[in-house]
Amino acid sequence: MSSTPTPAQEPMSQEPTTQERLTWMRKNSKRLIFALVIIIAAAVVVTFSFSLFTSTSANPGNVVATGSLKINNNLEGAAIFTAEGLLPGESTDGTVAITNVGDSAGDFTLSTDNLVDTPASPALSSVLSLVITEGATEIYNGGLAAVGTVDLGTWDPDESHTYKFTVTFAAGSGDEYQGGQTTLDFIWDATQS
């Protein structure tokens, strides 16, 4: 029978002596001091990072939105008056309601545009007068062709005004105006005040 060699038994490690420990510490003193400094620094950082007071405040969801300045015309896209077969000395009229439906006060004006006389000469508009009233207050009184721009004042939001337009064919106008026609547009404007 063959015998298997048994590994050599290792001697039991002995506890280092005090002298060996002191020698080891002298040789590694710089390393020990460095390690000790790192441990102390880490402890200071951890201590202070957990002991500071903190506070937070927020103002979320801030919004800025624009308002509007808008005109509501109850006859939008339609004529205020239409007169067919008007004779010298006769009048025609119509009313319109204008409202500031915007968020802002506005300076309102009325003007005319696209005045066309058919035939161009003699111009029927030269013998037509226009009176614009609001209740008992006269806003304009003059020639239809001379309206220009009428200042209607400053209107607050939701302010409404109803105007009556009366057009009169001048009495005594001659035969040269027979079959004549005048068309024009009334333009309402508002500017934020």
Image (cartoon, rainbow, N blue to C red):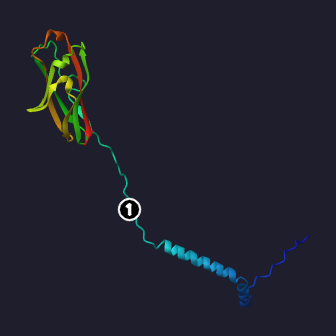
Could you say which quadrant of the image residue 110 lies in? top left
**Which quadrant is the C terminus positioned in?**
top left
Nearest the viewer among 79 and 176 is 176
Image point (34%, 48%), residue name: 64
In the displayed structure, would residue 147 be above or below residue 182?
Answer: below
Taking the view exactly as shown, the residue that stands out farthest to the bottom is: 19
Residue at numbered disc 1: 57
For the image, the number of numbered tags is: 1
Could you say which quadrant of the image residue 125 lies in? top left
Observer able to see residue 158: no
Image point (68%, 79%), residue name: 31
Nearest the viewer among 133 and 51 is 133
Observer able to see residue 177: yes
Image point (71%, 88%), residue name: 22
Near mark 1 (Cα within 10 A), the count class, few <14, some 14-19 or many ≥20, is few
In the displayed structure, would residue 148 be above or below residue 32?
Answer: above
Taking the view exactly as shown, the residue that stands out farthest to the left is: 136
**Residue 60 in the image: x percent, y percent?**
37, 54
Answer with left or right where residue 66 lies relative to residue 150: right
**Residue 16 in the image: x percent, y percent?**
73, 86
In the displayed structure, would residue 32 be above or below residue 4?
Answer: below
**Which quadrant is the N terminus positioned in?**
bottom right
Answer with left or right where residue 22 lies relative to residue 169: right
The kind of residue tagged 1 is Ser
**Residue 66 in the image: x percent, y percent?**
32, 43
Could you say which quadrant of the image residue 32 lies in? bottom right
Taking the view exactly as shown, the residue that stands out farthest to the right is: 1
Secondary element under disc 1, as helix, strand or loop, is loop
